[in-house]
Image (cartoon, rainbow, N blue to C red):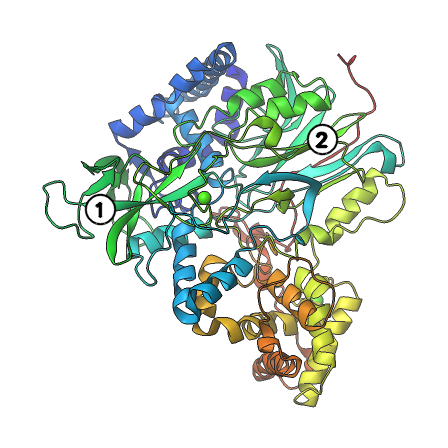
Amino acid sequence: MFGAGWVTADDRGLFIELIRGPARVAALDVPGLDALDLATSLRQFTPSAATERYLSAQMAPLRRAGPKGRQVIADIDAYVAGINAFYRATGNSARAWTRADVVAAAALIGAVFGKGGGNEVASSQLLSALRKRLGRRGGTRIWRDLRSAQDPETRVTLRKRFPYRAGGRGSAPGSRAVDAGSVSMAAARAARVDMAQREQMSNALLVAGGRSANGRPLAVMGPQVGYFYPQFLMELDLHGGGIDARGAAFPGVSLYVLLGRGLDYAWSATSSGSDNVDQYLERLCDPRGGRATRRSRGYVWRGRCRAMRTFDAGTLAAGGGEPARRIRFRRTVHGPVSGTVTVGGRPYAVTSRRSTRGREVMSAIGFADLNANRVRSARDFAAVMSQVEFTFNWHYVDNRDIAFFSSGRLPIRPRSVDPSLPALGNGRHEWRGYLRRSAHPQAVNPPGDLLLNWNNKPAARFGAADNEFSYGAVQRVELFELPPRSLGLHDLVGVMNRAATRDLRVVEVWPRIARVLAGGRAPDARTRQAAQLVDDWRRQGGSRIDRDLDGRIDAPGAAVLDAAWDRIANAVLRPALGPLTGQLARVARRDNPASQTGSAFGGGWYGYVDKDLRALLGEPVRGRYSRPYCGAGHRAACRRSLWRALNGAADRLAAAQGGDPAAWRANANAERIVFQPGLLGPANTMRWTNRPTFQQAVSFLGHRPRP
Ligand SMILES: [Ca+2]
Ligand SMILES: [Ca+2]
């Protein structure tokens, strides 16, 4: 561990100093601040003594966890000593590292990649607005359609059911929808920051021996943690002191390999975004007995008006056009206060509770076991990964088995609460413990001999987190098209890599749109040709490649669909949502197109368009929406609106690129991946691709004796 610390300081000294301050913002869940964004924009944060105490206190639960926890503490101390020894040896003047720094770095992973949920207020505001527009019943039904908490058509990794409640149908006296338009600016900003953080892009493809050419399981899997230079992950090969592991580690907590392999097995993760963050509505009161207003500093908890506490986190240095400022926030028993709302006209504060807050290093116990090769079989894997409290889907392969376990400290909510909505924070609707290990989605060699995950829902009936509206009928994991024969490792790499450049919209959604369009005439020849170009593009595979590197995506159809998608999405939903169509986009984005951050098609209105149009066309639909959307159910009206959308796109393209649709092209350079924060000079970009940033392609041939 000393060596891992030394090497980390040597190789990633700049990186660990960059994240050191901002990581504390993640550990504290400071409302309205994005820790990753601060780190990559080189903002410095100087913590207060209270922040350091808060982080150091996190050793206590580790100590209570017994010998394994104490071993982790000893490992952390040796790691920190290694970093500091390197600093001394090289005359680095940075402040000496402490346990608190490791806790903070762990939080950056847990509070950014390893969590889900926590947007109940914004989501409930949409519900209120829909009810206001369409009546309580009609509004609620549409909202449930859009929420897609349990869409039976969504692609799952495990067909076996692992019920985890995502939303109630009946009465939920412990939950409330906030008044439409009542969210304070601070709370709205915090929600926006939270939503912007959600970039999930890791994937995993595992094939059991029954489908592999060599009879041994195969795995092609890796995390996607964004494009940065220096990179977010470093590769370590650790041997000694009972540890034998190789793979990717996160600088700052790189005492263990997080994703990699041991003596005879390999493992990797995808973000699951499972719901471990809940927002509470704290009824405001005046501790001195006056009338409650939005500015009141008291909240009602177990029948009494209590004063909120203020947490002084430290100083955020100037940057991004902002002067230096002191970071203070108020908190209640549940967590930090992000702002205020009204419910039935009364003022409430909004707080968030994250199940892993204050326990950031507990997950280390699971990684210590993996690195010490305590996993001797696929069955051990679930037991070990159940110690990881962050929310991830874990994939496992050895020479005989493949396995899956979806981890996380997942709260069990009382029946009085609808998990899609914010809960009343009065003390009567608190969590009732955490999901037990056997209830987590898991499998060893599942039926079908296949495990595929690209941040889609892990298992049937496992409810989508409150902020996850896109677990609907269309998922990018469907782009993994496996040939119907036994596979080699190179085949599996090929399946992953082909999916990395395909456009999900044209592959999975366009065929329905085209079928509706085909029933009637185009408004003009140019628009007809535009639609034809998208058809052609799909027939050719729907790739966004710029093969000749002229800076233009080769298929003209890409230009058409890029320009048309938002118009099409609006055309489908507007007949029902009207002016609220834009508000939906604030809780569930219309599109997740190819962009400079690499990840794409992780969520959008793809499922809405697909399911609604299938119903309109009379095609089979499971988990039908409560009502028709496009054209309010009239096929001719829907068709007209879709042609209008395409016509608008064609007009825009003609204005920008001339009247010949065959000459239209999308700008491939605009979606080239850009490495943050921009230290690479002219080599700072690469071609767009939608795949992990670190990958393993493995097949094991041997194994230690099995127990
Ligand atoms: Ca939640
Ligand atoms: Ca080209």
Q: Is residue 501 above or below residue 451?
A: below
In the picture, the quarter occupied by the C terminus is top right
Residue beneath the point at 74% across and 21% down: 264
Amino acid type at image mark 1: Leu
Residue beneath the point at 74% across and 80% down: 518
Q: Position of residue 516 (x, y in %)?
A: 70, 76
Residue on which disc 1 sits = 284
Residue beneath the point at 42% across and 22% down: 87
Ligand 1, seen in the image, is in the quarter at top left
Q: Is residue 311 above or below residue 664?
A: above
Is label 2 in a helix, a strand or a loop?
strand
Residue on which disc 2 sits = 403
**Residue 227 seen in this snapshot:** yes
Specify whether 311 is left or right of 2.
Answer: left
Binning the other alpha carbons within 10 Å of mark 1 as few (below 14), some (14 to 19) or many (20 upward) gives many
Amino acid type at image mark 2: Ala
Binning the other alpha carbons within 10 Å of mark 2 as few (below 14), some (14 to 19) or many (20 upward) gives many
Quote the CA–CA distance across marks 2 and 1: 48 Å
**Residue 271 seen in this snapshot:** no
Q: Point out which mark residue 223 bears.
A: none
Q: Position of residue 566 (x, y in %)?
A: 55, 70
Res 459 quadrant in image: top right
Q: In front: 85, or 279?
A: 279
Q: Position of residue 109 (x, y in %)?
A: 49, 35
- Of pointers 2 and 1, the one earlier in the residue sequence: 1
